[in-house]
Image (cartoon, rainbow, N blue to C red):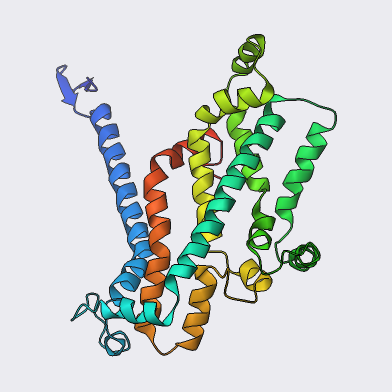
Amino acid sequence: MGILETRNGRGGVAPRVWNTHIGRQIASSFNLWLSYLLLIAVSIVMISPLVWMALSSFKSRGEIESITLSLFPRQWLVSNYIEMSSKLDLLLLLRNSLIMTSLLVFAQLFTSSWAGFVFSKFTFKGSAIVFMAVLSTMMIPGTVTLIPLFILVTKLGLKNTLGGLVFPGLVSPFGIFMMRQFIDTLPGALIDAAKIDGCSDFRIYHSIMLPLLKPALAALGIFVFIASWDSFLWPIVILNDKAWRPLSVGLAFFVEENFSHTNLAMAGATIAVVPVIIFYVAFQRHFVEGLSMSGLAGF
C-alpha cells in the first residue's frame, strides 16, 4: 500500500518506496508531540509562580529576600502560617468570603439558567430586543457603573452589609448568554412533550432543563466562584468596617501593614488560592464539556 512502481530503462520494474500513509502518520505524531511540548511549556510558565508562592510560604523572610534563589526551602517553617493567623482574623475572613461567594454562585446559577431558558425556548414580543439589551451591558466597564451603583446601594441602606456586598452580582449578563447558548443545543421536543403531559413552565425548568444543564452550570459556577473569591474593588468600596470584609480585602490590608514580612504574605496568598483550586478540581470534568456545548470554547 502506498508503493509506487515505475519502469526503469531496461524495461523492468523498479519500486520507488514512498509510503504516504506512514508519512502522514509520522507528520501527525510529530505535530501531536509538538503540541504536547508547547502545552507543557505554557503550563510550566503559568504554574511556576503558584508553586514558588506555595513553597515560599514555608521559607523564612531572610531566605526569600536572599540573593541566592532556591526553589525549595532549606528549613520548612509552619510557623509562618501560625504567625499570620495570629495577626489576621483568618477564620472571619474565610467565613465572609465563603458566604459571599456561595450566595453569588447560587444566585447567578439560578438567574442565568432561568433567564437563558426563557430567552432560548420562549418567544414573546420584544424578546430579541430585551436579550440584546442584556448583552449590551457586557460592553460597559464596571468602573463606569461603580459610582451610580454605590449611590444606589447606599440609598437602599445596604452599605456595610452582606446584602450590599452581593447585590450587584445577583444577575450576570455573561451567565445569561452562556446558558442561552447551551439551552439552544437542547431539542425543543422535550418541552413540547412535557407541556402535553401538563407540566408547568417552572416544572419543565426544574425537572427537565436543570439536569441537562449540569455541564454548563459547572462551567459557569467555576467562573463565578473565581471572580467572586478574587473580587476586591467593590468590597473595598462598599465596606468600611471589618464585619463582612472578605479574604481578598483582608489580605490586602494585612500586606500593607506588614509589607516587610514577605513570608507571611506568601502564607496568606497560598491560603487564598487553595479553595479556588479545590473548587476547580471538583467540577473540572464538566468544565470543558460545558464550554464546548455552549459554543464558548473559543470565546
Q: Is residue 159 left or right of residue 25?
A: right
Quadrant for residue 271, please give it. Answer: bottom left
* Towards the viewer: 118 or 22: 118
Furthest toward the top, the residue is: 196
Q: Quadrant of residue 55?
A: bottom left
Give the answer, above or below, for where 283 lies relative to 19.
below
Residue at screen point 79% across, 44% down: 133
Q: Picture coordinates of residue 297 (x, y %)? A: 51, 42
Q: Is residue 173 above or below residue 261?
A: above
Residue 170 sits above or below residue 48 on the image: above
Q: Position of residue 281 (x, y in %)?
A: 37, 49
**Residue 147 in view here:** yes
Q: Quadrant of residue 259?
A: bottom left
**Coordinates of residue 56 in the picture (x, y in percent):** 30, 77
Can residue 227 be spotted in the picture?
no
Closest to the observer, 184 or 91: 91
Is residue 295 found left or right of 80 in the rendered image? right
